[in-house]
Image (tube, helix red, strand yellow):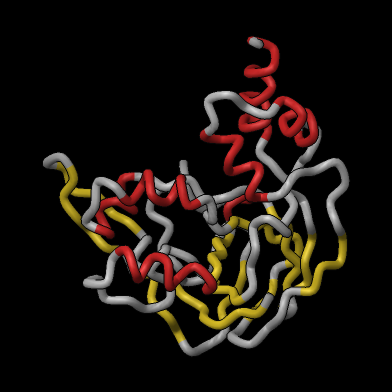
Amino acid sequence: MKIISTNIAKPTTFIWNGKEEKTGIYKMPIHTPIYLGKEDVKGDEVSDRKVHGGVFKACYLFSADHYPYWKNLYPNLEWTYGMLGENLTVEGLDEKQLNIGDIYKVGNALVQITQPREPCYKFAYKFNSSEVLKQFIDHGFPGTYVRVLEEGTVKTGDRFERVEKAKNSISTWDFFELLYAENKNKDHIKAILDNDALPQRKRAKLAAFINKG
């Protein structure tokens, strides 16, 4: 996997249901390295820290390999890297090969795969589409957030080197499917209940599904 674009956002306001909202989803490429901090990318806008930023969502990665799919669906948008809201556009990122908890060295930072992106109304607003949320879920390639274990700088051209493979885990692809499936795979849930690369509240919610069943 190789970084082909580093992207950050300035705060952008818009009107949603008659109320002014602020967002950091309008990321644009910058041609300088970026610094991955423990809870966010230095200089990047994180408007709502209830759902973005923080230890388990310090930086968002999306695969450059899926840009053609989205460009084909929305050819009239102004396309640049960062369009999917990612800090790092990564060539060769494959959610089926990334396991929750895997640890990678990139640049002089050390990061851990945590959880896929779950799209929200701000994503729909940016794409000016009521269908894009379902399309994002159905497509099944959501990118991934990472936890920053060691802060550091990354730049275009840096490659990800896996230094530790997670044990007793599942892929980001499987976990994303798990989040939205009506009939959830209980074996997949059991595999990640002790995985501390996921927030405890998210694991507890999945554990409740098993207990309810």
Residue appearing at x 62%, y 65% in the figure? 37
Location of residue 173 with respect to 40 vertically, above or below: above
- Number of marks: 0
Position of 109 with respect to 134 (left or right) is right
- Which quadrant holds residue 203? top right
Q: Quadrant of the C terminus?
A: top right
Residue extending farthest left: 18
Give left or right: position of 204 versus 131: right
Which residue of the protein is positioned furthest toward the top in this rendering?
Answer: 212
Q: Is residue 103 left or right of residue 211?
A: right
Q: Point out residue 90 in the picture as x, y percentages from the top left corner.
A: 59, 74
63 displayed left or right of 51: right
Query: Looking at the figure, which quarter contains the N terminus?
Result: bottom right
Identify which residue is drawn at 34% across, 69% down: 72
Give me the residue at 69% from left, 17% from top: 210
Q: Position of residue 77 (x, y in %)?
A: 25, 71
- Residue 18 location, quadrant: top left
Q: Nearer the viewer, residue 140 or 83?
A: 140
Residue 94 in view, yes or no? yes
How far across and how far down the image is residue 172, in percent?
66, 50
Inspect this view and state whether residue 49 appears.
no
Question: In this rendering, is residue 157 above or below 132?
Answer: below
Residue at the location (42% across, 51% down)?
136
Q: Position of residue 139 (x, y in %)?
A: 47, 52
